[in-house]
Image (cartoon, rainbow, N blue to C red):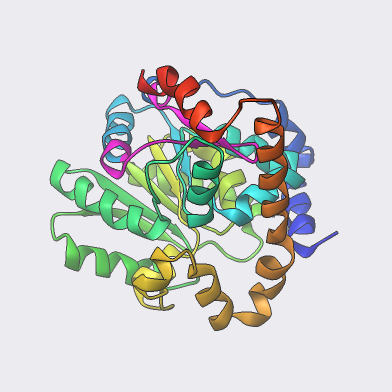
């Protein structure tokens, strides 16, 4: 059992155990806006075909509806985790929107004949959503990262968008997910702050499972899982240069900056993605006459709705 799988199973012990089983059996009705968005199946993970402007429109509509939900940002690592862990996959399935963070997912969409609209990286989403929130008078809450980082990120965002309302920030202690008292404190903070949106920077798989369990209880209209984005915004970590991002090599940049922590994830665990993609391609196009172009034509009517 890998350390990440063990951590995921530990998370399920909270509130008497069985959390992953509960998530797997839980069904969440998608919001009307999400139902209208077409999606592609990339290695068993639903990824919405949506532009940045479309996402911003749907996010603000969700805030207006005051109906709690959350957004996930799948990358290669998340796809592999979904394939290996039903609890994580269930948390993913309950998301309001699922948008591609990793460039390899764009490659996969094109290979499978269901091209995605473009990459929507978590850090870029924070900037774009905050800019939109500032113009519409919406408030945001920053949850996660190490002590002091959320406050630094908040100052950076205020400097960029002076009209942005920061409802609050909080850095949970290590192991908080196993503590009923710590989770109750977070929910109490969110109830008191009443933010319109909450950026959750806890890392995967923790942030997706936490949002799946607590998004409704928090009463926050929209949560967005953003991984290490607060560290990048605060300047605690340096993001990959734009050329690496466009080439789909942001993972390589992160590997070079944190080799001891990330080598196994990128060089061993995530190789499963290419196995899954090859298998899906063979299954989809093994029938005579089935080509990527044919799939686009067959699915065109659905994605146009």
* Image label count: 0
Q: Residue at x 43, y 47 (%)?
A: 224
Do we see residue 158 in this rendering?
yes
The answer to which image quadrant residue 209 occupies is top right
Q: Residue at x 56, y 82 (%)?
A: 256
In the rendered image, the quadrant that contains the C terminus is top left
The image shows residue 113 at horizontal and vertical percentages of 51, 36
Q: Is residue 48 magenta?
A: yes
Q: Is residue 195 above or below residue 26?
A: below
Do we see residue 179 in this rendering?
no
Q: Is residue 305 above or below residue 277?
A: above
Q: Is residue 107 magenta?
A: no
Query: What residue span does the magenta drawing correspond to?
Result: 34-55
The image shows residue 83 at horizontal and vertical percentages of 72, 44
Q: Is residue 256 left or right of residue 134?
A: right
Q: Is residue 129 above or below residue 87?
A: below
Q: Residue at x 62, y 23 (%)?
A: 27
**Front-lying residue, 106 or 138:** 106
The answer to which image quadrant residue 166 occupies is bottom left
| Residue that lies at the very extreme toward the front in this rendered image | 289
The image shows residue 6 at horizontal and vertical percentages of 79, 57
**Front-lying residue, 66 or 178:** 66
The image shows residue 13 at horizontal and vertical percentages of 77, 47
In the rendered image, the quadrant that contains the N terminus is bottom right
Q: Is residue 196 left or right of residue 173?
A: left
Q: Is residue 59 left or right of residue 137?
A: right
| Residue that lies at the very extreme toward the right in this rendered image | 1
């Amino acid at each position: 059992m890998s350390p990440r799988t063990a951590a995921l199973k530990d998370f399920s012990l909270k509130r008497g155990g069985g959390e992953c089983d509960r998530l797997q059996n839980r069904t969440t009705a998608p919001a009307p806006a999400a139902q209208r968005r077409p999606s592609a199946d990339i290695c068993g993970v639903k990824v919405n075909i949506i532009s940045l402007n479309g996402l911003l429109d749907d996010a603000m509509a969700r805030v207006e509806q005051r109906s709690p939900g959350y957004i996930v940002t799948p990358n290669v690592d998340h796809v592999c985790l979904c394939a290996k862990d039903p609890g994580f996959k269930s948390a993913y399935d309950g998301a309001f929107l699922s948008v591609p963070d990793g460039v390899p997912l764009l490659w996969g969409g094109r290979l499978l004949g269901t091209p995605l609209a473009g990459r929507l990286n978590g850090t870029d989403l924070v900037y774009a959503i905050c800019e939109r929130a500032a113009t519409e008078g919406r408030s945001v809450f920053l949850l996660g990262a190490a002590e002091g980082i959320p406050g630094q990120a908040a100052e950076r965002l205020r400097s960029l968008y002076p009209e942005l309302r920061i409802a609050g920030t909080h850095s949970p202690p290590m192991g908080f997910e196993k503590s009923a008292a710590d989770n109750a404190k977070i929910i109490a903070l969110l109830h008191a702050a009443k933010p319109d949106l909450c950026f959750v920077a806890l890392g995967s798989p923790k942030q997706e499972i936490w949002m799946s369990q607590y998004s409704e209880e928090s009463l926050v209209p929209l949560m967005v899982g953003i991984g290490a984005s607060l560290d990048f915004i605060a300047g605690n970590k340096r993001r990959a240069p734009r050329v690496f991002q466009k080439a789909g090599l942001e993972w390589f940049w992160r590997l070079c900056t944190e080799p001891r922590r990330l080598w196994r994830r990128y060089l061993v665990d995530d190789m499963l993605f290419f196995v899954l993609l090859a298998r899906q391609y063979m299954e989809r196009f093994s029938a005579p006459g089935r080509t990527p172009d044919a799939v686009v034509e067959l699915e065109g009517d659905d994605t146009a709705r």
